[in-house]
Amino acid sequence: MTIQNFGTAQPSGTTRTASDNVILPAGSGPIIGDDYLACRHDDVFWGDLPCATDTAIMSIDPGTSVTIDTLSHEGILADQGRDPRGFFGGHGVDPDMVLDEAVALCASDRTHVQGVDGPHVVTGPIEVRGAQPGDLLAMTVVETRRRVPYGVVSNRHGRGSLPGEYPIGGATYSAFVSVEGEGDEARGVLPLSSSNPQLAARFPLAPFLGIMGVATAGAVRRNSIQPGPHGGNLDLTLLTEGATLYLPVQVPGALAYVGDPHFAQGDGEVALTALEASLRATIRFDVIPASDVAARFGGLVAPVAETREFLIPTGLDPDLDVAVQNCVRSAISLLGVRYGMEPPQALAYLSAATDFNISQVVDLVKGVHARIRRSDFAQ
């Protein structure tokens, strides 16, 4: 691959992306947000999430959009040599096509214990001025841009949906995926066999952030793997451009963060990771005051998202059956407050008209989400 770096920030609307054999280094290329947050190795969290006692690295007013650089954990972990240029070089990537942030983080003295710490690199936290417990933080995905033209899908730790069967022999298996094409035509290219890379599966991309969250109360940082009411590692594939995620604020200022960038993921994420690769994401942060929460969301106990097409309640639990039940309860509640639907009628509607999808089964706490069509309630 041949490198072509952007030297200075390009105007909003630039269409060149990393699949043109261009990477997006820190501070270069299109930055469309009101503010910008780089992914500096001495600021990021690696394997855990912000809590109440952590200090924000940026403070913004509600309604502000921030362009945020994120860094994938693939290629930097110990079982991949903690040497991203060496790891990706083994797949034919030129050294200059590896993000400097990945190299700097691996070369730093940051401690990261694989198998104990979560794998994820998290950018933040961001203080949203005025946000208080009882409010909701709305995080709207304005735009995503690929920072590199490649990614990785890994199966490791004897986990994934088939522990004990995969990875074969117990060693980490990392599948390298290149990107071809532009815009809606972009595809991930995954060889059918490591011994014959000429034959490949090609699949559409739908970039999103696997981690979007708010800080938890108290002085103990949560592991980055398990999602919860704070959001975190939801791995919710519908959080693409235009989607909004609503999270209960747990500490003053919310202390929001993002990470775990994906180019694509199938619901379930059965291998353990999906197509993990670094993104630049622009997020708008809004605060819904506590006085408006009940009327719009009822008794919110789990994250809720929405897109132009769907309302998306979620359910979380280590037991997948319980996660489904929690999602159904959340959906019934949401239909009641949004449309005045009686609970028995709501349950009947959900059974007849709504898909319940497995978000992921690999993050210790399993996730389920419902796709409630908003058009079904247009009067």
Image: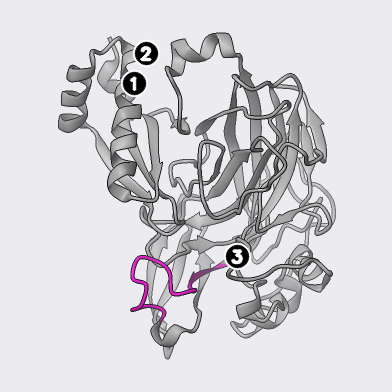
Residue beneath label 3, please? 149
Q: Main secondary structure of the magenta part?
A: loop
| Image quadrant assignment for residue 3 | bottom right
Residue at 67% of width from left, 42% of height from top? 257
Residue beneath label 1, please? 333
- Alpha carbons under labels 3 and 1: distance apart: 42 Å
Residue at 78% of width from left, 28% of height from top? 60
Q: Report helix, strand or loop for mark 1.
A: helix
Residue 17 visible (yes or no)? yes
Q: Quadrant of the N terminus?
A: bottom right
| Image quadrant assignment for residue 35 | top right
Nearer-the-camera pick, 286 or 322: 322
Q: Is residue 42 magenta?
A: no
- Alpha carbons under labels 3 and 2: distance apart: 43 Å
Residue beneath label 2, please? 337
Q: Is residue 326 above or below residue 292?
A: below
Q: Which residues are magenta?
A: 151-167
Upstream in sequence: badge 3 or badge 2: 3
